[in-house]
Amino acid sequence: MTSEEGTWRRHARGVAPGLSARVGKAIKCFNPNRWGEFLTTELEVSRKNGLLPGVAFLLLTLSAVALFVIPAWIIQPFRYQSPRALSLALTLRQIAPGGTLLAGVVALFLAMGLWPRMSRWKKAATAVGLFFIAAAAVMARTDYFEWMFHPVSAPGFQSVTDSKLDSGEMVLAVRFGNEARAYPIRAMAYHHVVNDVVSGIPIAVTY
């Protein structure tokens, strides 16, 4: 027994019966030479505890952005949409408002919990992630398809003899009585909707 440990034991006996044994065990357990190893272990545990919320935050950010980007990417002018892809886009479009809101709320709570332990660059990355989630939530509530597809309210027409359409070009044809219209598929693929009046009957032509 060292002189220091004996001194601790004597002081412990004077304080309370039976306390000296516990103090002696505490002195034996504590090793100043292993303090660095203890700190390293604590840092590793802290990193692991922050890893899972960080990954969850990243997945929430990607999910919110995907709810906006995927429908916008699939439904584009002059781009073929398969039935399966179109069904997926419409489904995501329907759940996007609620999905982006939920992702934003959960991501905000995660960011608030992680913020005090974050480094400067992680705080910047978190702020950028929250910005993208907020932007996706706004776009999910916006009819951005109107920006891509412009309905024609007052279409102009040419006679068959003046038309420069190729003979093999596909058109949508409408006839009421003695009046007929032909709407080129090439133009309809961009506008998608044409409001017109044929023989006094208002119609909406869509493709």
Image: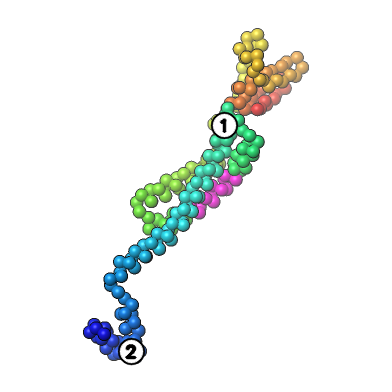
Principal SS element in the magenta part? helix
- Closer to us: 72 or 199: 72
- Left or right, 11 with respect to 173, comes to left
Q: Position of residue 199 (x, y in %)?
A: 73, 18
Q: Residue at x 74, y 19 (%)?
A: 175
Which badge, 1 or 2, comes first in the chain's sequence? 2
Residue designated by label 1: 76
The residue under label 2 is which amino acid type? Ala
106 part of magenta stretch: yes
Residue range (magenta): 95-108
Question: Is residue 90 shown to the viewer in this render?
Answer: no
Question: Is residue 202 shown to the viewer in this render?
Answer: yes
Count the numbered circles shown.
2
Q: Residue at x 71, y 20 (%)?
A: 174
Residue 16's tag is 2
- Left or right, 80 with respect to 59, comes to right
156 part of magenta stretch: no
The correct choice, above or below, for 3 with respect to 61 in the image is below
Q: How are the colours assigned in the image?
A: rainbow
Q: Residues within 10 Å of mark 1 (few under 14, many from 20)?
A: some
